[in-house]
Amino acid sequence: MILSMSGQAWLFLSMVLVGAAIGLFYDAFRILRKTARHSGFAVTLEDLFFWVAATGLTFYYMLHRNYGEMRLFSLVGVAIGILLYFATVSRWVIIVFVAVVNYLKRVIAAAVRIIMVPARLVAAWLAGPLSKVYGGALKHTRRVRRYGRGKLRATARDWGIVRRKV
């Protein structure tokens, strides 16, 4: 199908936006890699998934907007969109989202420690009677008690952090 000049301009601009979306999608993987440990195999699988999804998105968009015709300016538009995204916004997106994810990880870890206080208290409380029943395990129950008291102090400290920040 023949597109007018304005139609081709809109198609080019939309392909630039598709390229920027692909760049944002890749940044999601980069943020995930900066906030969680990955093995080399996991990185390879993520990259494979990214390229299959990016290719599928580009093909789908070109099929519906470009009527299945491969036009060079469409591919150039995708490349320009990716390059513009990485040259302008990518750095700030990564900085902000890595900070947000790390903050959320700290808040969730503190919340889990606070929620686990009753279980720690029960474990520390049971450590005394259990040490009498299981005489040989006395040093292990002391460790459990010490662990429970230490975690209780850490939980109180975390609760103070959460109360101040939230």
Image (cartoon, grey):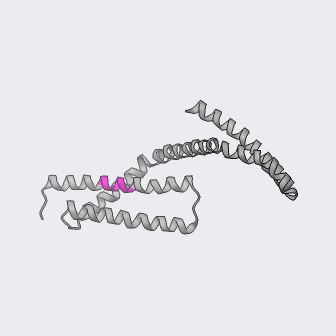
Question: Could you say which is closer to the camera, residue 89 or residue 40?
Answer: 40
Q: Using residue 164 as the reference point, say whether residue 61 is left or right of it.
A: left
Question: Could you say which is closer to the camera, residue 147 or residue 43?
Answer: 147
Q: Using residue 153 as the reference point, say whether residue 9 is left or right of it.
A: left
What count of labels does the image hold?
A: 0
The quadrant holding residue 23 is bottom left
Q: Using residue 8 as the reference point, say whether residue 60 is left or right of it.
A: right
The quadrant holding residue 102 is top right
Residue 45's x, y, as percent? Answer: 49, 68
Which residue: 83% across, 49% down?
A: 142
In the rendered image, the quadrant that contains the N terminus is bottom left
Residue 18's x, y, as percent? Answer: 31, 55
Q: In this view, does 88 lie above or below 134?
A: above
Q: Using residue 106 as the reference point, say whether residue 138 is left or right of it.
A: right
Q: Main secondary structure of the magenta part?
A: helix
Residue 153's x, y, as percent? Answer: 73, 38
Which residue: 58% across, 41% down?
A: 107
The quadrant holding residue 116 is top right
Which residue: 55% across, 53% down?
A: 34
Q: Is residue 21 magenta?
A: yes
Extreme residue toward the top, this view = 164
Question: Could you say which is closer to the camera, residue 42 or residue 51?
Answer: 42
Q: Give the range drawn in magenta.
A: 16-22
Q: Does the magenta stretch include residue 139?
A: no
Q: Is residue 33 above or below residue 155?
A: below
Which residue: 50% across, 52% down?
A: 31
The reply to whether residue 139 is in sight is: no
In the rendered image, the quadrant that contains the C terminus is top right
Residue 152's x, y, as percent? Answer: 72, 40
